[in-house]
Every structure is written in structure tokens, then in C-alpha cells.
Amino acid sequence: MASSPENNASLSVQKVTRSESSQAKKSQHAEEAIFYMNCRAAYLTVLKSSLENIKSKEQLSLVLQQAGRNPSQKTVNKYWTSQTTTLNFDDFCTILKKEKPATKTELLEAFGKIDVDNTGYISHDELYKILTMRGEKMTQDEVSTITKQADFNCSGKLDYKKFCDFYMTTSEQCCKAAQEKLEGDSRLRQQQFGSQAETSSEGIMVSKPPPRVSRKSNHKLAPTKGDSRTSSRPSSAQSCKASISTTISMAASSNRNTKLIEPDTIKEWHCAQSKGCFYLEEDGEIISHKYKLHLPQKSTVCITIKPLNIRQVEGKSCNWLSVDTALYILKENETQENLQLVNFTEQQNKEMFGWKGELGSGIYWLLPFTSGCRLKKVKTQITGEAKLVYRGEDGELALTKEFRATLLDIFETIDLDGNGLLSLEEYNFFELRTSGEKCDEEAWAVCKENFDMKKNELTRQGFMDLNLMEANDREGDPSDLWVTLLSLGYNKALEMTEACPFVIDIYAEKCKPRIKAMYLEAGSWQLNRAICKSVVNKGEAKVMDASENIIIYTYKAGRRITSVIENKSENKVIIHVNNEHSKNCLSNRGLAVFAVEVAPKSMMVSQHVMPLNEQEEWLYNCVHSLLR
């Protein structure tokens, strides 16, 4: 049957969309590759290797300068505290992501606020007062260094436009010199340590492997299902004392495994539910709600967690629905600090993960977890900023249709108990996330006088009116509204790209369970310990060749593979991790090759890996090597 023009047009649009998506991914990966290359270039200008640590404030300041930053003493002190002894290459990359270099426009705007008459000059006395008494205060010597430069000083005044040009040129020269040194030294260029690996749209890959094998031939080379050990080592680890290889071949999954079998009578069981959310911080750290579960008596329970399926807009992606979720169940014994791992949600039914078993009476902690494979910082091209407010014919401010719809989604997410109202407790989780402050009883009483409430809880309309009041307070300036939206994971197109709302359901056969959100914070040490313990208990252990004190545990839960490193020795070790032969994989590290430091007598998560495309076969091939 001949296809219609409408179908052809639809296919053309799909192809263009896929092409644009592919180009966006390539652009993002190119930006990441350039960023890590610049990081390495700066780092290796001061230190001999990516594995060598920064050992002093002076070294930190110097390596930041080589990366084109101009850190004040306060900035350096922020990252080098009284407890800091060393910082590694990954720490340095994280700092550079936070400390963005100043642009010429930003510098000129800052000086322009001082030069109210727009003369192009600032007196030395005025400059001295500002730089030594406001903000990140400079020392007298630091200010003197600026005012003594003849190139941009005349008659006791600073020509700040020339100064900005000098600042930008100096910063660019530092970066260029570092890159030229890296390019000119073949030994440094060939080092495979740290974050210099490129990541392609196919997932984990090596830094320019020679030669590149096509996807079609890879299927022939892929090992059979199961684990196998290879004797090959990555070229970057020739000096490694010992290594171990793990390979797992996974089939494509058109629909995910259905393992979670709910009892036929579960609808008759007692149920408790709570919502929550994973939020992505600026540095890539993930925070989420933490819960306390009270079970009055011993009972069979079924506990599930899955992404919250809120409103979906046609033509807009719902990234959070593909984010992996899990829940670790810990028993409280006497104190909150003494938590014992009971189990975790490893059974899967589509996007839902669950656990079914028997729990005794008492207090349990439920710690939500996502690997970070799919919930991570992604740079996307936003063509235009969504409009949040407008003025009607009467001149009064109103919220746009798009913003109102987004606020309803936010309300749905922060209404943890799902009763259609916001309690003070629920509202304070929202306030802590967006402003860092809590609303006290007195302020809540003021809200009650001004906004629609029922039973001392804020309604949807009240929540809308509260945001409208905020816009009115700024006379229509949406800046504060955007601060709220961005902190909740939305981008300028009102797409939720850096958050994942979820819902937890608890069914108990013999008693009424009670669940309560207690905190909104980053993954605690209890969660990290629970993850390691679960992998050690259920995963496959391999002792590293020639080093019986180093054990690598690998565990596959649903469509996620987690590896844990255990160091039983009395000394810290550095483990080199190489994923260069993995195919169609996505790692929470975002790196093909990296190194991790494992403390004596301890365990740590090496990485989490998931398929980039679940509809295709994927191959996990990881080599852990001991460096020292």
C-alpha cells in the first residue's frame, strides 16, 4: 500500500528529530571531552600525573590559575578546609565545574555598577575600599598588584575596560600554555588515568581506541552469556601489579523482566503510600527524601518504588520515567545510627522495583536510591525561555497557562501523602529545597490569612496564588520564580530534566503500616554501606590475581550492574578501572577510564552501569587493575 503524504511528512519529522537529538548528544560529548582535556592540561602543568594528589593550598591555587580561574583566598579556603589533607583529580574537576570562569561581560557589568557615571574609570581609592571591604575581601598586596599595572592605570584611576581585556587575555594564555605543554609531551598525552576519556553516544568507550571496530562485527566478537576472565590489560595499565576482568553479555529487552509477583489478595491488605523526589545538585550529587516506616506487628509486606507518572505533555520528553529507582530497607535497632540492612527492591515489573517478604514489628528506614546513570547533568540547547507571567487587559499580573500546568505538577510531587493538600511539613520540604529556609508556625498563620486553605493545609489554588504573589512582589520580574523552578529540576523550557519524582507503596497483610518522610538530603553513609553490603551478599566475588586482599564484587539487579571494591589490606590502594570494551553501556561515572582510591579495610562502589538503549544488546566488560 502506498504511503500517504501525511505519513511521509510524519516520518520526515521523526528522522529530523532523531538527527537533531543525535547532533545534540555529539555536541554535549564534544563539550565534555574539551572540558576534561582542559582539566588534564591544567592539572599536569603542576603535577606529574592525574593520579598524583594536590597536597597544599598553594598547589590548589596554582592549578586553578592554570585552568583560567583567578581564585581568591576565600575560594581556596572553601575547598581546602582544616580537615583537608589532599585533593585528587576528580575533586579538581568537580571544583572547576562549580567555579566557572568570569566572562568579560560579567566583569564589565560588575565595574559598571561602581562607575555610575559611565566614565570608564574607577579611582584607586574607591577600588581599594571595594576590594578590601566587600564580598571576597582581597589583601592590600593583591590590590596593589592591580593598581601598579601601567597598562590600565592612569592618573590614579583604573581603566577597567583595559583591565578586563588584560584579565581575559591572561586567563586564555594560562589555558593555552597548559594545553600546549600537554600536546608537546607524548608521555603525558598517552596517560589514560582520570577523566580524560571520551564518551560517545553509544555509552562507555575508550579514549580513541585504534582501530574502531564496527557495531556489526562486534556482535561476532561478543562472548557468550555469563562471566569470563580475560588476560588482556588496557594499554594504560601496563605497570599494574594485578588485574581482573569481568564480562557480562545482556540481551535486548523489548519489555523489562516481570519478576515481582504481587499476591492475589494484595488489594485487601493494609496500604500506606508516600511520594518523594530525587533532585540533582549543581555538582552532580543526588539528594532525596528519606523515610521512617512503623510496623505495629509482624506481617508479610510488599514494598515497591517507581517513578511518579505525572502529567505528560505531547512533544515533550519525560526523562524522569526512564530513571532507575530502588529502595533499601534498614531495621532500626535501639538508635538511628545502628541500622541493619534487611533487603532491597531487586524484583522488577516494568519500571517498578519491589520486595516481598516478612518483617517483624518495629521501626524501619526506607532509603531511596538511583544510580546516577540516567539522572545526571545534561546540557541541552534551549531555543527560548518559557514565559511565566503576563499582564492582562486590566494591567493585573497573571500566571501563564504553561506555568500553571507546571505548578500543578510541582504540587503533585510535593504533596507527599497525596491528599490534595500541603501540610506545613510537606511545604517545608519544598521551602528547604527552593530557599534553604523553613516556614515557621507564625508565617504559616499569615499564609492561612492570605491564601486558600483547608484544615490548616494549603490547597492547589492557594499554592498558585502564593506564586502569583511572589511575581507581584517583584513587579512581574520572574527571577525568583526561575530560582524555584531550576532548584526543582526544571530547565528554561519548563521540562523536568534534573529531577525524578517517585512513589512508594507499602502493603502489609496483618497491620496498618505508617510511613513518614523525615529528611531531604544526600545519600548517607548508611545508604552507601547498604549498597556495598547488598552487592557483597548477592554478587559474584573475584579475587584479584596476585593480590588476595583485593576483591571485586559484581551484581546484576534488573537492568543495572553494580561493582564494589573491597580492600582487606592495611594500606590504601589505587584501582584503575577500564570500560573501553563495553558496548551500549551508560556508567554513573560518565568516564571510560578512571582511577579510585580505596581506604584500608574498607569497601566502596566502583561504578553502576546500565544499558544506554534497552532495545539493543549490551556488553559490560570491565577491567579492575591494581596500581599501588
Image: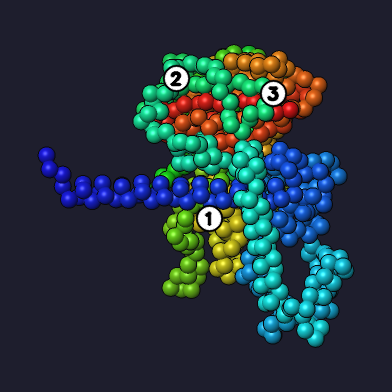
Mark 3 residue type: Lys
Q: Earlier in the sequence, mark 2 or mark 3?
A: 2
Q: Is residue 323 above or below residue 249?
A: below
Query: Where is residue 607, by image quadrant?
Result: top right
Distance Cα–Cα, label 2 vs label 1: 57 Å
SS for dot 3: loop
Would you say residue 50 is visible in this rendering? yes
Q: Earlier in the sequence, mark 2 or mark 1?
A: 2
Query: Where is residue 534, by image quadrant?
Result: top right
SS for dot 2: loop
Kindly identify the residue that appears in the image at 60 percent across and 67 percent down.
474
Q: Earlier in the sequence, mark 1 or mark 3?
A: 3
Q: Nearer the viewer, residue 233 or 608?
A: 233
Q: How is the image coloured?
A: rainbow
Mark 1 or mark 3, whichever is nearer to me: 3
Q: Which residue is mark 1?
A: 464
Q: Is residue 625 above or below residue 498?
A: above
Q: Measured from the top left, where is residue 261 in percent x and y?
A: 45, 17
Residue 241, which numbered label?
3
Q: Nearer the viewer, residue 290 or 379?
A: 379
Q: Which residue is mark 2?
A: 223
